[in-house]
Image: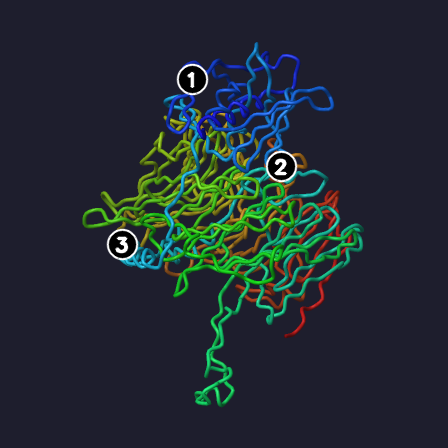
Amino acid sequence: MRKKAFVAALLAVVMLAVPSVADPLKQTVSAQSGTQIWVSGVPLKLSAPVITLNKTTVVPLREVAEALGAKVAWKMDSKQRQTITLTRGNRSAALTLGSNVLMANGRIIKLDVAPLIKGKVTLVPLRAISESLGTVVAWDGINKIVHIDEPAELPIIGTKQKLEQLLKQIEKNTSIYYRGSTGFAETADGTVISKVAENSLSAAASESPASASGDYSQTNVQVEGVDEADWAKTDGSFIYQLSGSRILISDISNSSAPKLAATLEYSPKEGFYPQELYVDDNQLIVIGQNNTVIPMPIEPGIGGSDPAGEGSSSNKMGIMPPRPVSSTVQTKVYDMSASGQPKLARETELEGSYISSRKIDSSLYVITNKYNNNDFEPMYGDSAVSKDLKRLPLSDIRYFPESPENSTLLIGAVDLAKPAQEMQVTAYLGSGQTIYASSKHLYVAIAKYLPSGDTYRQETQVYKFRLDQGNIVYIGEGSVPGSILNQFSMDEYEGYFRIATTKGDMWASGAERSTNNLYVLDEQLKTVGTLENLAPGERIYSTRFMGSRAYMVTFRNVDPLFAIALSNPVKPAVLGQLKIPGYSDYLHPYDENHIIGFGKETVELPSKGMGQDEMMAFYQGMKIALFDVSDVSQPKEKFKEIIGDRGTQSELLYNHKALLFSKSKGLMAFPVELMEIKDKNPIEQGGFPAYGQFTYQGAFIYHIDLEKGFDLRGRITHLSENDLSKSGQYGFDYGKSIRRILYAGNTLYTLSERMLKANNMSSLKENGSLTYPAPPKH
């Protein structure tokens, strides 16, 4: 019966895929000859062939509904249109012939194709209906099979005995996990840095159109429509930003006289420290770490009553025993008034350390990692249902088989449009490290080091979840050789997951020498395409996926920019490469044929102690470059600019959110900490490149186009002449360090923890400024 209902739901989805036009089949339509629909592993016989409309698979309703075990009801609406309602368990999907709107479980979903009737057969969009009814749809492009299955389920811990068994296995794996890994990597100039620091420095980077509904900038994000939390945001009327343990809300309705509208103070006694925020639909969402005292029952003789009259000495002295403190990630949701006054509406908590979050429409997903000490049942809470924290029992915690770490990954999913609906919490024994999210899926990547003969092999395990309207559905897992750099190493496009890795050690030789690779996985996370052994002896510094292409920068001494074709997922191939000095830490699309690189210039010098013929690259000033990939077989560096000398830094090089970019405005801006060599002697005694001295910190504002490249229009700083005179060779007043540049209307806003400046976007002349009050002393 479930199988029949499943088919019915599937048919309903196909029908929804057809657009509302007089003759939708006159659009881009391709018959999928040989395409099969498999439901729970069984091929489905259809009364009409599978077709594609605007890249959406549509199929007959009746057979799919029956296979899914869904009940189908027909009726006429008020406009005399036929509507179809499918129900399966506690889920439902309602659609109307000719309408591209699907009502799924109380949520409105826009369809690329509306349901239609061809002959006597009702056709509906397959994926939309099937997933609305709770199933998982996966396209096997090689065998031309659409798989529709029940969600996969990871095993449950359930009991303490099972937990102990898993912990023994984890303890055994721990020595393997770290075996052969020093935990350190070397930079381009030979400086050794911690891999933990390196990963945190490169943990973010992305494109996002800085345009938005309304003429104000948006956070630069990796995937359009998938919002990422940031240090500061604007809604065009107000600017919201962090300043230490405060949230400052500034009224920018009058750019010549910006004023502080409200301040959210979080005292140390609260234990809450804000880290990032979202702003959307008259709501402010603040995410931060919170230290929570774990509730403990008071035992007789320990700081409480002692019925026997034999209390301990600590009890007699009135001394309470130390109470354990747990770290949680707290989300505070504020309703915003028209005057910019926040009102706390809801709080949620998840135990652990904050990994990342994403917001898609009204759905918020928060991901944490809980290190397990003695307690394996994580705490969580949601003020929508209770002010008290509760524990997730072992019976609700699942585990990733052969997990390398003694940690628990937690995902909290909240539908902000349903304030009375409790946050859904899912927990998995096995940590999460790097997060990538598309508009429909969340991918969690975990590094593994597995035994291989006398050494080990690097592997990246990827777990896939569907983001299901404020819920989380586990889809499956896959793995690829090597390790990823950051979230930009991953991408989803037209049903395929692409991932770039570095395998091996760039300083080793022989079989252990590093190579760089790109893999394409299908919807079931099976590897279908492989491109390996790129740039031996180097490692990936940046990757950018752009539709059917990928761009990868590797580096050791020179910067090869690889252009990679992904139009055939089964056969990814290098189209061309460009070798130039320097490297790019972050790649940002300008348009489909041009890409901007942000990184460092380098110079090659003989390396002492490594042989006369051995050369080593030393980084210099910050480099920005515009690459022309119109002819992908011959990428060109069309324009470049070097900012400052050795030591010059920018938050943009490790955090993509620090970039302001608008192609339509020809605007590009980012913060720079400028280091310059005063005596113009680039080489120190001993033959190594000299470091510059600190001379400036502020926003660099460029005009960018394809005719003239980069035109520095001006610089804006929050440092006064007095501040600069007090600065040292390497440091300055960091409270006035500009971190973000935003715009609203024709005004450019620069933000530091101490102040806000408003400058005319055309002339860059200062309109007004706001110095924030000093934080209270606690």
Residue 719 at what x, y percent from top left? Answer: 66, 61
Judge whether 103 appears above or below 615 on screen. above
Residue 364 at what x, y percent from top left? Answer: 58, 47
Q: Nearer the viewer, residue 67 or 535?
A: 67
- For the residues labelled 2 and 1, the Cα–Cα distance comes to 31 Å
Mark 2, secondary structure of its residue? strand
Residue 758 at what x, y percent from top left? Answer: 73, 52
- What is the three-letter code of the residue carrying label 1? Lys
- For the residues labelled 3 and 2, the Cα–Cα distance comes to 46 Å
Residue 208 shown left or right of residue 340 in the figure: left
- For the residues labelled 3 and 1, the Cα–Cα distance comes to 49 Å
Image quadrant in which the C terminus is located = bottom right
Residue 61 at what x, y percent from top left? Answer: 53, 20
Mark 3, secondary structure of its residue? helix
Marks 2,1: beta carbons within 8 A:
no
Disc number for residue 45:
1
Q: Nearer the viewer, residue 663 or 322?
A: 322
* Residue behind mark 2: 107
Marks 3,1: beta carbons within 8 A:
no
Q: Which is more foreground, mark 2 or mark 1?
A: 1
Q: Residues within 10 Å of mark 2 (few under 14, many from 20)?
A: few
- What is the three-letter code of the residue carrying label 3? Ile
Judge whether 226 appears above or below 427 on screen. above
Q: Residues within 10 Å of mark 3 (few under 14, many from 20)?
A: some
Q: Nearer the viewer, residue 548 or 347?
A: 347
Judge whether 314 appears above or below 3 on screen. below
| Of pointers 2 and 1, the one earlier in the residue sequence | 1
Q: Residues within 10 Å of mark 1 (few under 14, many from 20)?
A: few
| Of pointers 3 and 1, the one earlier in the residue sequence | 1
From where the camera sits, is residue 698 visible?
no
* Residue behind mark 3: 176
| Of pointers 3 and 2, the one earlier in the residue sequence | 2
